[in-house]
Image (cartoon, rainbow, N blue to C red):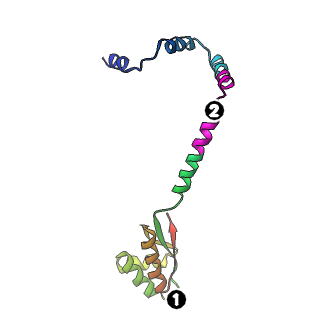
Amino acid sequence: MAEATATEEAKQYTEKVEDILSKLSDFTLLELSELVDAFEDRFGITPAAAPVAMMAAGGAEAEEEAEPTSFKVVLKNFGEKKIQVIKAVRAETSLALKEAKAIVEEAPSTIKDALSKEEAEKCVQTLIDAGADAEVQPE
C-alpha cells in the first residue's frame, strides 16, 4: 500500500526526459562521468562555481557565529583581601561561607558561568573592587 502511494506521488516527466532517463540507466559510471564532462564543454557549465559560493556563504555564517554570547567569570587570584573577596563571591553566587572560601582558595576558579557580557563584567567589577584579580572569559 505504501508503494502505491509513493508511485502516485512520483514526479511526472515529459516523454523526452523519460526517454533520456531510461537510456542513462544503462550507462556505466565511467560513461556518466564522460557525459558530465560533455555537458560542461558544450554548455559552458562550471561546477566549481556553486561550491565556492556555498563555501563563501558558510564562511560568513561562521564569522557571525564566532562572536560569543555566553561568558564566565574566572577568579584568577584573591589578592591581599581574602575575606573581602570571599564576601564578594558569596554576594555574587549565594554560596555558603564554606563553599565560597573553598572556591576563593582554589583560584584560579570559575565563579559564575552562562552569563551575558554585561552580567559577567558587573560580577568581575565586584570582585575587583573587593581586591581580587578576576576576568571575563567567553564560554
Question: From which residue to which does the magenta span run?
Answer: 37-55
Q: Nearer the viewer, residue 12 or 105?
A: 12
Secondary structure, mark 1, is loop
**Residue at 53% from the left image edge and 15% from the top image edge:** 21
Question: Where is the N terminus found, in terms of image quarters?
Answer: top left
Q: Nearer the viewer, residue 95 or 21?
A: 21
- Residue 80's disc is 1
Q: Which residue is mark 2?
A: 47
Residue 83 percent coordinates (x, y): 43, 87
Residue 68 percent coordinates (x, y): 50, 62
Q: Which amino acid does the dot numbered 2 rest on?
A: Pro
Q: Nearer the viewer, residue 98 or 7?
A: 7
Residue lying at the far left of the rendered structure: 1
**Residue at 56% from the left image edge and 47% from the top image edge:** 58
Secondary structure, mark 2, is loop
Q: Which amino acid does the dot numbered 1 rest on?
A: Glu
Residue 14 percent coordinates (x, y): 46, 15
Q: From what the image shows, is residue 84 above or below residue 94?
A: below
Q: Nearer the viewer, residue 104 or 12?
A: 12
Q: From what the image shows, is residue 34 above or below residue 115?
A: above
